[in-house]
Image (cartoon, grey):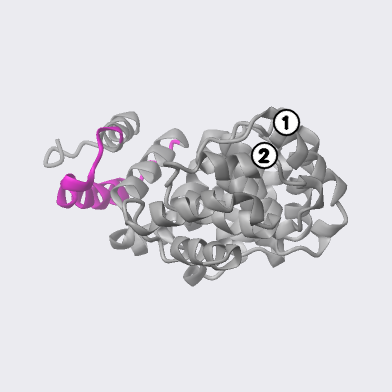
Amino acid sequence: FDAQSIATIAYAAGMLSLPADDELWPTISRGSQERVDEFSDRQVANLVWGFATVAHSDSTAPLFSRVEGCHVKDLAPIDLSLIAWAMAKVCQGGDSFYKDVADAVVAKREMWKQSDTRNIATLIYAFALAEQAKAHEPAFRTLAEVVCNRLDDFAVQGLTNAIWGYATACFTEPSWFAAVASEVMKRSPSEFEPLDIANCLWAFATVTHSETPAISKLKELGRETLQEFTAQNVAITLWSFATLQVRDEAWFEKAADFIVQHLAECKSQELNNTLWACATVVVRLPRFF
């Protein structure tokens, strides 16, 4: 296979969420290492995105080192976002790498006015996940301002990634959260996935922004779609309600029934969060305990 074919296969495997232990990944890794210098920057972006999507980082050191050598400032917005997200996801990239990414974000300020909004949300997520948002505040603020100015253009998932990024990076600007909250109120219920509901609530709770109408809407959406949640989604949601002092006994009872039915899927942290939430808002559920 040539470099283009290898990059395309890696990207496709990532899109299909091929398990990290599938034999295809080490095969792609070996093939990419043999011709690491042949890849274009776009092909490298597709490669590392594929590996990072399934958290496969074994034997990929040469490939991620190749990312460090990319001409980051010259990358197209989509490639910049894919590479930044991938490096953050697998805990790669040093300070100089993220400085280059931040410089590129600021330099492309005008491009973000037309760029695919997924690129913008992905970069916010990457800076937050890599704990680089505060170190590169001008770049992070540039992206956040674009979100506020282009709310209608974002899918709910993009808005969720943005607000998750704000909260994770400990930015508490009221206008940023209020902008997302106002957009949440406009969107159709069908646009929300369980993870969007849980992560939006978590973000509001983490920085204690009580955007009451948006929280009420998210609570009702969660009530209607609870059976589609994972145990982690439920635990995050209950923790958020408790932190925000939202006491809805019927919601907690329904969630407790869900947790009991899915105990085998629950990690200790999820059980701890659930118990803490019940105790915090004083909801007594004897059958759960």
Task: Please report the residue visible at 59 percent of the width from the left and 59 percent of the height from the top.
Answer: 46
**Mark 1–mark 2 distance (CA, rounded to whole Å):** 9 Å
Look at the magenta stretch and give its main secondary structure: helix
The part of the image, by quadrant, that contains residue 18 is: bottom left
Q: Residue at x 64, y 45 (%)?
A: 84
Q: What residue do we see at 33% from left, 48% from top?
A: 234
Which percent across, then down, holds residue 51?
48, 51
Label 1: few (<14), some (14–19) or many (≥20) C-alpha neighbours in 10 Å: few
Q: Indicate left or right for 138 with 25 as reference.
A: right
Q: Are marks 1 and 2 in contact (CB under 8 Å)?
A: yes
Q: Amino acid at mark 1?
A: Ser
* Segment tinted magenta in the rendering: 245-269
Residue 80 seen = yes
Q: Which residue is mark 1?
A: 96
Badge 2 is on which residue? 68
Residue 149 falls in which quadrant of the image?
bottom right
Furthest-left residue in this view:
287
Say what amino acid the circle numbered 2 marks: Glu
The reply to whether the magenta stretch includes residue 249 is yes
**Residue 223: percent from the left, percent from the top?**
35, 58
> Looking at the rendered structure, which numbered label has been put on residue 137?
none
Whole-percent x and y of residue 185? 59, 61
